[in-house]
Image (cartoon, grey):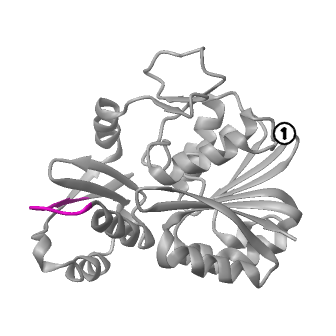
């Protein structure tokens, strides 16, 4: 598969401005981001790339940012080689060690996850994934049924499985993410994750104890009615992929319509993850 790499470089940019731009790019299909000198690179598969959509995002940037944008077509194997050069292992709350296949195991940590992203979002390094993993590490998911929406690499579903979850469904509308979830499940010897390629229309007609949804605000707002339909009474939803203001209040309001109520939230930088419970 071929990919488009769009590199954004700035004379100066605040972290919140960078996060807002990444959020906008995520809403139009860019699913992987990495830091580069003076900016960052965003990746999207060639079939999903739309130059007009990209122009719509870049034209709305503050002119004071002096953004230079470079668009390059690359092969997946070249991107993976570059990723391997830069990927560093990650430790979450001194409990979960996330590594690639070329890193040595670290058995002193209770949970180890091996991830090969294959252009899919979710190595744990992004703040949203980190916070979702922190929530999972303190949750009781043993023996429970889990729905992971926008699963990316499958990292959250894999962690839930390692924490003892019984039945897991991982959904993403990107076929690269779908394949990545299958491959990463096998790398971690996980056999109870059902990976599905699609959106809200493929959510199974069953009830879940816990829903994980690390996507973005607009998709979350659109899919909340579907989450409400399949979440058991007393069940928990963990959301991430959005900002504290104004996003969190919008999500609270949308959830309250379905008797899904806010409990608490975490924040790293400008990103937020939040926990909700259904009455």
Residue at position x 52%, y 46% from top?
130
Residue 161 appears left or right of 23 = right
Q: Is residue 74 above or below residue 276?
A: above
Q: Nearer the viewer, residue 82 or 263?
A: 263
Taking the magenta stretch, the answer to whether it contains residue 206 is: no
Q: Is residue 60 above or below residue 68?
A: below
Q: Is residue 14 visible?
A: yes
Q: Looking at the picture, how far across and down is residue 51, in whole percent?
A: 26, 76
Q: Looking at the picture, how far across and down is residue 242, in whole percent?
A: 50, 67
The segment highlighted magenta reads 6-14
Residue farthest toward the front in the current orientation of the protein: 264
Q: Looking at the picture, how far across and down is residue 195, in whole percent?
A: 69, 50
Residue at position x 42%, y 48% from top?
119
**Which residue lies under the disc numbered 1?**
142
Taking the magenta stretch, the answer to whether it contains residue 11 is: yes
Q: Quadrant of residue 181?
A: top right
Q: Nearer the viewer, residue 187 or 135?
A: 135
Q: Is residue 188 above or below residue 240?
A: above
Q: Secondary structure at mark 1?
A: loop
Q: Looking at the picture, how far across and down is residue 279, in whole percent?
A: 88, 71
Residue at position x 44%, y 20% from top?
103
């Amino acid at each position: 598969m071929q990919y488009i790499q769009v590199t954004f470089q700035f004379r100066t940019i605040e972290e919140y401005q960078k996060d807002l731009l990444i959020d906008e790019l995520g809403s139009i299909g860019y699913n992987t981001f990495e830091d580069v000198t003076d900016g960052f690179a965003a990746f999207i598969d060639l079939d999903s790339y739309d130059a007009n959509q990209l122009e719509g995002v870049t034209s709305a940037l503050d002119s004071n940012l002096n953004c230079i944008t470079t668009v390059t077509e690359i092969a997946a194997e070249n991107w993976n080689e570059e990723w391997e050069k830069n990927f560093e292992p990650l430790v979450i709350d001194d409990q979960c060690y996330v590594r690639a296949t070329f890193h040595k195991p670290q058995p002193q940590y209770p949970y180890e996850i091996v991830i090969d992203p294959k252009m899919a979002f979710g190595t744990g390094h992004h703040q949203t994934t980190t916070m979702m993993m922190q929530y999972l590490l303190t949750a009781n998911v043993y023996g429970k049924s889990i729905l992971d929406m926008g699963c990316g690499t499958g990292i959250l579903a894999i962690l839930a499985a390692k924490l003892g979850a019984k039945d897991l469904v991982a959904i993403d509308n990107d076929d690269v993410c779908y394949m990545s979830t299958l491959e990463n499940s096998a790398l971690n010897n996980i056999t109870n994750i059902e990976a599905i390629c699609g959106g809200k229309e493929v959510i199974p007609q069953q009830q879940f104890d816990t829903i994980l949804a690390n996507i973005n605000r607009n998709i979350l707002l659109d899919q909340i009615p579907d989450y409400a339909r399949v979440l058991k009474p007393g069940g928990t939803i963990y959301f991430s992929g959005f900002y504290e203001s104004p996003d969190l209040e919008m999500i609270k309001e949308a959830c309250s319509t379905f008797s899904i109520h806010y409990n608490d939230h975490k924040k790293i930088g400008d990103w937020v993850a939040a926990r909700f419970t259904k009455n």
